[in-house]
Amino acid sequence: MLPKPEAKAKFYVWLGTPEDEREVKTKKELSKVLDVTEQTLIEWEKPFRKSGLTDEQRFKNVLDTLYELATEGKKTTAAELYLKATGKLVEKTESKVSVELNADQIERIRREAEARVREVSRGGNGTSRLPTESPLLLQ
């Protein structure tokens, strides 16, 4: 069973999600997931049912409410949901990439790197501060 503030925060994120992107499609289904009554969800939604509001205004209201929940103490789930919804918190994933290079490709990359080192190492007066050939790159 989720604590009420966390359930409420998750409901507000669900409410701010476009209907076609919601994994749980109905309030009835969501009430079971959050372990609250459907009537509770209807009560939580009342502040957002003002007629004449655009989707953007409703979304802003949801974010404002999540922000308030997040700053009212130690409601870290609401804070996390708020930051994710505003794009300030992004899940980072790590993936490994394997690259196979043949001897010609390695030699071309070495020459390009050496040329860049020479280019960057040139001083403002046209003189080179590094040797024209890098001993490390020639090995």
Image (cartoon, rainbow, N blue to C red):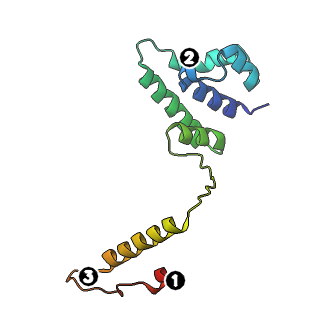
Q: In which quarter of the image is residue 117?
A: bottom left
Q: What residue did someone put label 3 on?
A: 123
Q: Quadrant of residue 124?
A: bottom left
Q: How crowded is mark 2: few (under 14 residues within 10 Å), some or many (20 or more)?
A: few
Q: Residues within 10 Å of mark 1 (few under 14, many from 20)?
A: few
Question: Residue 28's x, y, as percent?
Answer: 70, 14
Q: What residue did someone put label 2 on?
A: 46
Q: What residue did someone put label 1 on?
A: 139
State whether residue 73 is above or below residue 43.
below
What residue is shown at x 39% (from left), y 84% (from top)? 133
**Looking at the figure, which quarter contains the N terminus?**
top right
Q: Indicate which disc, 3 or 2, sits on the residue closer to the N terminus.
A: 2
What residue is shown at x 56% (from left), y 34% (from top)? 66
Q: Indicate which disc, 1 or 3, sits on the residue closer to the N terminus.
A: 3
Q: Nearer the viewer, residue 35 or 139?
A: 139
Q: Which amino acid does label 1 sit on?
A: Gln
